[in-house]
């Protein structure tokens, strides 16, 4: 329900909220309520707005992923926030738990670079050779933060599933990520990937929007 929506930042142009694992960012074929639906309902109730409420989608998280999601409250905000994501002036920081510890032969931090090709019919991404038609370059940075089973991740590019594929390519798929090599699901069908922090230029003011989402209380992050 919209009353459970957790607000991280709100102003005239921007709304940053917490996405729980398992909730789609936008309406999909499941017919389930989405984060977008909840955010629109919250704005309508909070500001007592008659009629339809404008809300712009400027980025997304996969359904099983939790963390910060930013929406635009105006068309100007949508255009400028969208440009920030496309122009890589938005900083996105993730934390992940690994189903298998990172091999000792792998460095404690590094950059993973691949050409990825998406199979939209199966919603799966695979690593392919450079030059493969429709393939896109993906670059991700990782750093171990707790033993060899917990990492901080930063996507340098913005490709679908790139962080999930990056760690799977190192032999360490994310906990619960059956699609990319984990052996068993998590109880809530999430994957252990959390978009912890988002820093993005404010669309109309000379300042940054800096939002940090708490970890979900699903037992994965204890």
Image: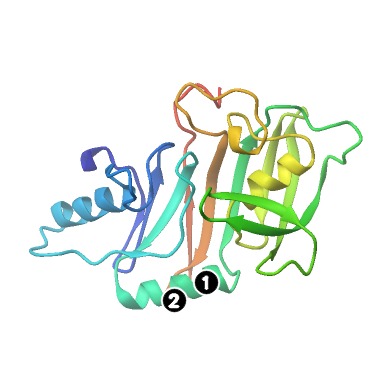
As drawn, is 49 to the left or to the right of 2?
left
Along the line of sight, the residue nearer the viewer: 21 or 42: 21
Label drawn at residue 80: 2
Q: Secondary structure at mark 1?
A: helix
| Screen quadrant of the N terminus | top left
Q: Residue at coordinates 40% horizontally, 44% vertically from top-left?
A: 18
Q: Position of residue 189 (x, y in %)?
A: 47, 29
| Screen quadrant of the C terminus | top right
Instruction: Quote the CA–CA distance across marks 2 and 1.
Output: 6 Å
Residue under pointer 1: 84
- Whether the residues at callouts 2 and 1 have beta carbons within 8 Å, the answer is yes
Q: Secondary structure at mark 2?
A: helix
Along the line of sight, the residue nearer the viewer: 211 or 84: 84
As drawn, is 144 to the left or to the right of 106?
left
Q: Image height check: is 190 above or below 112?
A: above
Q: Position of residue 129 (x, y in %)?
A: 80, 61
* Label 2 CA crowd tier, 10 Å (few <14, some 14–19, many 20+): some
As drawn, is 65 to the left or to the right of 94?
left
Q: Position of residue 43 (x, y in %)?
A: 21, 56
């Amino acid at each position: 329900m919209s009353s459970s929506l957790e607000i991280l930042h709100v102003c005239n142009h921007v709304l940053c909220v917490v996405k729980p694992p398992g909730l789609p960012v936008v309406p999909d074929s499941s017919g389930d309520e989405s984060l977008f639906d909840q955010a629109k309902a919250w704005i309508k109730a909070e500001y007592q707005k008659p009629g339809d409420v404008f809300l712009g989608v400027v980025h997304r998280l996969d359904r099983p992923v939790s963390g910060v999601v930013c929406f635009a409250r105006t068309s100007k905000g949508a255009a400028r926030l969208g440009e920030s994501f496309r122009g890589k002036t938005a900083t996105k920081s993730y934390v992940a738990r690994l189903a298998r510890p990172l091999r000792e032969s792998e460095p404690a931090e590094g950059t993973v670079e691949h050409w990825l090709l998406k199979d939209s019919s199966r919603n799966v991404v695979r690593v392919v050779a450079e030059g493969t038609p429709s393939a896109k370059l993906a670059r991700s940075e990782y750093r171990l933060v707790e033993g060899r089973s917990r990492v901080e991740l930063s996507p340098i590019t913005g490709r679908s599933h790139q962080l999930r594929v990056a760690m799977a390519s190192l032999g360490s798929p994310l906990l619960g990520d059956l699609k990319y090599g984990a052996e068993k699901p998590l109880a809530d069908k999430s994957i252990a990937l959390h978009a912890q922090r988002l820093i993005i230029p404010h669309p109309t003011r000379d300042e940054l929007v800096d939002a940090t989402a708490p970890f979900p209380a699903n037992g994965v992050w204890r």
